[in-house]
Image (tube, grey):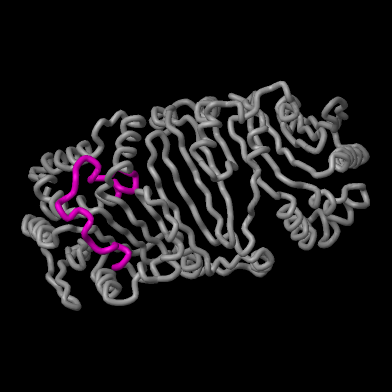
Amino acid sequence: MPGLVKLRLFLPAVLTALVALFAVGCGGGGGEDGGSGTDPAAVMPADAPFFTNLTIRPEGETKQNIEALAKEIAGVDDLGELIVTELETSASDDGEKFDYEKEVEPWLGEEAGLFLEEYQDEDFEGYGAALQTSDEDAAREFVDKQVEASDESFEDGSYEGVDFKVQEDETTIGVFEGLVVFAEDETIFKSMVDAAGGENLAGAETYSSAVADVPDESAVDTYVDIGALIKEAGGEIDSDTRLFLDSVGIEPEEATAVASLVPGSDNLEIDLSTNLSGDDPPSGDASELLGELPGTSVGAFASAEFGKRFSEGIDQIDKEGIPGEVPPNQLKKTLKQAGVDLESIAGSIGDVGLYVTGNSPSTLGGALVMESDDATQAKNTVSNIGLFLRKANVPGYTRINGEASGFSIRTPELGRQPVVVVSKDSRIAIGYGLAPTTAVFDGSGKSLSDQPAYKEAVSALGSTPPTAFVDGPAALKLAETMIPAGEEDFEEAQQYLRKIDYVAIGSEASDDLATAKLIVGVK
């Protein structure tokens, strides 16, 4: 393998590996200066729409957690050593000698960054990246050695006092400001030199405010300027969508989002924060309802204060109408005449939950659960809807009486089980299958809050209210019955999917910022 190929493969390989938390630095310590080096964001253009910052030499608890996850998930005792061995073996197989410990470890710093320049035609074009170095001279020596060993030609260049080299494929590499910097072409490289001496992403208010609260334990942080992506994609928001966004205070042109990857000893956490949710992001705590959903749930979700958003959606549908079915401004009026007052229903709805049960297509079921602040209205609403459907001679209609009362509709088009709508106390359940739907009213059965995996998930989320939960083994069992045999990708993934104990999501909001956590628990 010629030196050029080694250079091409090594640096991108470091970044690619880091994105998957396979950090080259996991297995060894840094040089004496370790953490010295410029923030990679300081050489990224201020208007970069996409930027990822990566920890390439994790230390302390972060390092220990990465190693623990690698061992639990893949059975790897020393992740860093494995990656280094693979890189050195690859070079050796192509007739080249490569010694990571001598050639790279002495100068490799703690962090790296990658930005993508433009978003066009549903894809990014142009990139630039930077690796911190604790020893610029050693880093230059490494680059020069790769160039000298290459069979391909390089051109030397200089810009604003920064020397660089350009490969035949236009990839450009140079060392400055405590960073090894490389870009897709010379133009992008020069823009990074300009950023280092002028306006750059690190100094941009939109970026600095977006990443202000990223966790200290994060191994990877990804920043997205949503407004810039919309602009670069040439997308124009239609007038109706714009009207809706304005009504809830959302300005997508000003929106940003940040996702952070935080490794734990027995879980992997992704933190997300965004101001896309507008001036009044959804808030509240629906964790009580989530915990009361059936303990047999494969997956479950709960949303607080759903009635407000439901009311806004109904208003929008009523205004536009349903093409070919209901004229504009007639939906609410028509249903009210039939005894179904959508505005009153929406006004009484509080939290909403959704769950799925079953371990095969034939046993699949579940329900949507709505909490009302008026038990009488909940019962009357279900009764009125049932009366409306019966008068309309809807086929398969059957009335349900008992502790939970309502109706069901069974037709061949709906499959093996009926659609069920029932109410009890202040809750309404709309589900598939009688037993799965009424399970939420069964006080004798176990709820999610009784399940060990759910308890672990809630504990892992900490102070963040849980909003969704997936039982790992149950979900895998259901997937195995639904995915055709012989699907190689799924079969290869099963060995890792079996390690997943649960997936939990929590969310909360304050001011104009919505935050969420996704945690994957490992057995």
Camera-nearest residue between 335 and 462: 462
Residue 145 x, y percent position in the rendering: 7, 57
Give the number of marks. Answer: 0
Q: Choose between 256 and 517: the one closer to the eye.
A: 517
**Residue at x 38% of width, y 42% of height:** 263
Whether residue 198 is visible: yes
Residue 450 percent location from the top left of the image: 61, 26
> Percent x, y for residue 463?
54, 44
**Left or right relative to 340: residue 193:** left
Q: Is residue 416 visible?
A: no
Q: What residue is rendered at 53% in x and 38% in y? A: 504
Residue range (magenta): 16-43
| In magenta stretch: residue 235 | no
Q: Position of residue 311 (x, y in %)?
A: 76, 55
Q: Nearer the viewer, residue 278 or 409?
A: 278
Q: Is residue 506 above or below residue 313?
A: above
Residue shown at the point (11%, 40%) measured from the top left? 92
Q: Is residue 31 left or right of residue 184?
A: left
The image quadrant of residue 161 is bottom left
